[in-house]
Image (tube, grey):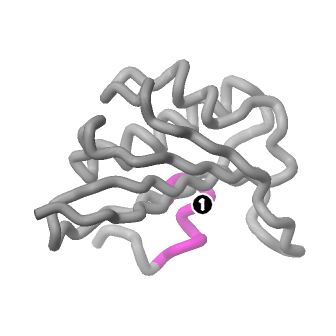
Amino acid sequence: MKRLYAIRGAITAENTPESISENTIAMGSKLFEENKIKAEDLVSIQFSLTKDLDTMNPCTALRKGYQGIDISQVPLFCTQEAFIQGGLEKCIRILVFVYLEEGTQVQHIYLGGASKLRPDLKKK
């Protein structure tokens, strides 16, 4: 039996279309692969990015650049991250809603400079 899971991730990027695209795709690819996600199980994908990243929408980056599973029918949404003084800069966050087998141990993906956001989720 399947149940709905929410899988998180984050990565940092430079404020260029190339960097945002490359890093969004790397984060999404790793999250999909590590969690063995199939297109038919995806519900939606939400992104947020800090206000200092404004040259590319990560939804567009993933939709145009990702070569893995077919995400053409998956709703994608992006919003600006709330500004918090001293918060991590140049950060893209992802939240994937997906149906997986009940009892699945999901793998949250924090890469690059964003790995310091959740050191408790680092793989041993």
Q: Quadrant of the C terminus?
A: bottom left
121 horizontally vs 103: left or right: right
Q: Position of residue 3 (x, y in %)?
A: 24, 65
Which of the image's four quarters has the N terminus? bottom left
Q: Kindly give the residue lying farthest to the left in the view shown.
A: 1
Can you tell which quarter of the image residue 56 is in?
top right
Q: Residue at x 34, y 64 (%)?
A: 5
Q: Can you identify the residue that label 1 sits on?
A: 114
Magenta: main secondary structure? helix
Q: At 45% across and 53% down in the image, what residue appears?
A: 96
Asked if residue 46 is positioned above or below residue 124 in the image, the reply reads above
Image: magenta residue range? 110-119
- Residue at the image point whose x is 27% and y is 55% from the top: 99
Left or right, residue 24 beside residue 96 = right
Q: Is residue 78 above or below residue 103?
A: above
Q: Position of residue 2 (x, y in %)?
A: 17, 61
- Relative to 19, residue 35 above or below: below
Question: For numbered disc 1, what is the local secondary structure?
Answer: helix
Circle 1: residue type: Ala
Q: Residues within 10 Å of mark 1 (few under 14, many from 20)?
A: many
Which residue reaches farthest bottom?
Answer: 120
